[in-house]
Image (cartoon, grey):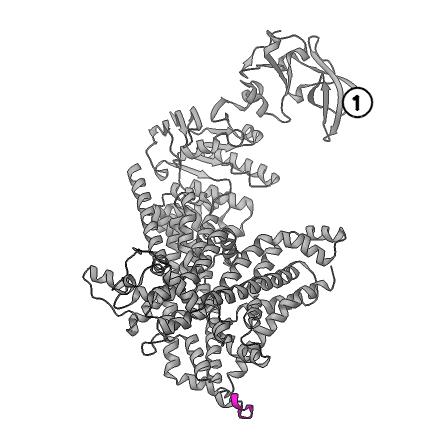
Amino acid sequence: MASLELSHVFRVIGGGQTVLHDIDFSAHHGELISVVGPSGCGKSTLLRSIAGLEEVTSGDIFIGGNRVNDLQPQQRRIAMVFQNHALYPHMTVYQNLAFGLRARRVARSVVEARVRRTAVRLGLEALLGRYPRELSGGQKQRTALGRAMLRDPEVFLLDEPLSSLDVPLRSEMRRELMALHKSLGMTMVYVTHDQSEALSLGERVVVLSAGKIQQIDTPQEIYGNPQNRFVAAFVGWPPMNFLNGEILGAHANDTQNVEYGIRPERLMLQQHAADDLSVSGRIECIESLGGVWQIEIIHNGGRLIARVPPDAALRQDAELRLWFNQTDLYAFNRTTGTRVKVNR
Amino acid sequence: MKSISGPLFVLPALTLIALFVLIPFLGVLGLSMTNFDIYVLASSANLHFIGGANYAHLFHDHAAWQALETTLTVVLAGVPATLALSLICALMIESIAPRWRGLFRTAFFLPVVCSTVAVAISWRYLLNTRYGLVNHLLLAVHLPALNWLGSPTLAVIAITVVVVWKGFGYGMIILAAARREIPEELYDIARIEGAGVRRQLLSITVPILAPTLGLLALLDVAGYWQLFAEPYVLTQGGPMGSTMSLLLLMYDRGFRWWRWGIASALAMVLTIIMWLFAWLQRHTKTSWREG
Amino acid sequence: MRIKVLTVRASLYASLTTLAILTLFPLLWVTSIAFMRSPEQSAGTPPLWPRHPTLNNIVNIVQREMLGHYFLNSLIVAIATTVLSTFVAGLAGYALAQVQFRGRRVISWVVLFAVLIPSQALVLPLFEMFREVHLINHYAALILPAAANPVSIVLIQAYMRGIPAEILDAARMDGAGEWRTFFSVVVPMMAPMLAALAVLTFVVSWNDFMWPMIAMQKASMQTLPVALASIDREHYQEIGLMAAGATVTILPMMAIFVASQRYYLRSVVAGSLTD
């Protein structure tokens, strides 16, 4: 039984604009699903609709098997963590953690015990008397997580919870979050605009664009087997190179209507297999990133980025031939953007 | 960067403040300890230092106590009423569609920018016993007409009403701005956690606005404490001195009877009590920012 | 649930509208009376609306009581006060926030102390000072004390602290002198705040009552509110006349406020949220 299920969910706002278009997916119990997409793609609206903070126009949402469309947020057995933590500034950590329980009129002694237990679990026990402004970014984050945990939710919703933290702290919190997910065994929906975060955290990833689901799959599949040009371009950094068929030489069914894609990290300086393909061009710039070099070449007016091992022989403005395996070549329909098979 | 421009830029303002605030303040302090009156005005040879005698006089002056009581009543009744009205209007305005907000903001703020003398004149006609509209309405619903400005108690109430009416728009603007600063996520979380509208108001909105409310309380106290034009126009301090405010009494003693020593002592008392309010406000824990 | 939301929203608008009408009523009614003929005003409670609007009351109070003259006095005083006060406070606020010099801290404290002194408590020595230099009954007696405005200085100081010092350093490195920096860089940067304070100062000066009443002993030098109060002493039975006087006093400020409320409200808010 899926613990979260969205069935043909639409949301149309005042001006007739469709913010969510036929969203249909489910997360089984204990699964961590990340939702990723550029800003304005509807991912926050999706999360807020699951939470009940916004109404959906049509379609059904099920949590733990029950249809929750008509339930108030507090009745939905969900918990939510916001980007800016949304801690009450005038309450101590303890009061922040206890607020929800108190609102549900849980007995004071029970509140006390549960808050303490959660605080110990998150390493917050020494901070219970502090106000949010006296906490570091990570401590605020843990408090917000603690508050969500205390709701004992069926589904845990996280809205870009790490994006307000600085980079080193972010990866630390990411690890903590994964450990927490493992130990709590809760269903989580994690919304982010950062594709690398979505891939590293999610057991499955939902790629969203313009209110529509582009692909739902495991991170490996999303990266290695994108179903359309949008997913291919959005996932991976630096982004996939796109070349039209004529430039590359006729390899596809219909060069006119096909666009080829190749990931920068799949381009090589040497030929490895007999049927490897190649492109050549003038080196526009070489950027050393330490252990790896990023090279930009101009090929027939098109621009390609490659990630290669450092090589002292490379010179700017020199001609360079880059090789790649045929299996690393993707092809997309130029008009629809859908993936098409590469013709060998 | 060191240059003479800094002192030069500050000089005009500093001169004005020294001449028209600091020196007069010392003047009030000095005058309050002299016997300065109409005889001194005639010949300065009559001027004497009399220490705290004016203060002692005020301590036994029934009119001074009554003025203190009246002013304090207006402050203690008016400030909470103003704050409540400001808060209610601010929260209501912030929860309607943005395009209508400006209209209501303007409506509530207009009395603030109007001349007190002019609005006091209009209120006097509203409250007039014979033909005032307020009594007209009271009679229309079969209630007795009231002698608003002729009875000591009612006159103080009427003046408080005028003061609140003229003042609440100011706080409304500030509280509305402060309310906009509260992130909406706090209310989202509260809804998820099961807090209803009442609880959101009492556990989130009001506590977070508390520092702003505290500051407004101080500003309102400082303003109402200097009550002058309303009683001057509406009642001239009457009936029976019931609406004589501290400043009105100071004006009366100073410029009608030329008893400047007494009047200055009153001005000092007024100032010191105002400082007391400011001190109280700073040391009351209305502010979670300061922990 | 939909219906409940709609009910709540409807009652919200209804209460706001009621409150707004109650708030505006004293102002609207007095304006309305100002245009009524005398039988309407004096026969019992005046109606809400003039049946036969007339300009008689306005003409009367302007001609008989020289209201135009007082209006001019008010205008002169308010404009001079606004210009002087804004300029002086702008200079000082900027210097206290962004120029390093000896005594800056002490002066900041002096300004803060001046904020705490209620200006109306100072009228006795002020009167004596202006009498000594024979400036009672001169515009200067109203303009100069009102230009000593510590609150404006504090507000500008707070506003200027928010402006990065690098911009000013850049101007100085470009070879602009302090005056040039002030007028071509600082003033444009604090223009919104200065505009807001100017409107605020103008309105406060226009409405000031106690000190103008004391300092302007000669009738011909009185400002509008002072003149209005003294006309009121004599003619307060003449409702139409007084209503016309009140209207003439109030309307310019309402117009100024409505026209400039964006600036005005910003200064009001800045005044209480910055500290």
Percent coordinates x, y for residue A242 in the rendering: 63, 19
Percent coordinates x, y for residue C16 in the rendering: 35, 50
Question: In this picture, is A19 found above or below B22?
Answer: above
Percent coordinates x, y for residue C160 in the rendering: 62, 56
In this view, the residue in front, C208 or B261, is C208
Q: Is residue B78 visible?
A: no
Can you name the residue that lies furthest to the left here?
A: B142
> To which residue does mark 1 refer?
A317
User: Which region is colored magenta?
Assistant: B41-49
Identify the image quadrant of residue A316.
top right
How many neighbours does mark 1 have within 10 angstroms: few (below 14), some (14-19), or many (20 or more)? some
C187 within the magenta span: no
Residue at left 73%, top 31%?
A290
Chain identity of mark 1: A
Query: Which quadrant does the C terminus of chain C fall into?
Result: bottom right
B45 within the magenta span: yes
Percent coordinates x, y for residue B183 in the rendering: 47, 45
Identify the image quadrant of residue B209.
bottom left
Q: Is residue B249 left or right of residue A275?
A: left
Secondary structure beneath dot 1 equals: loop
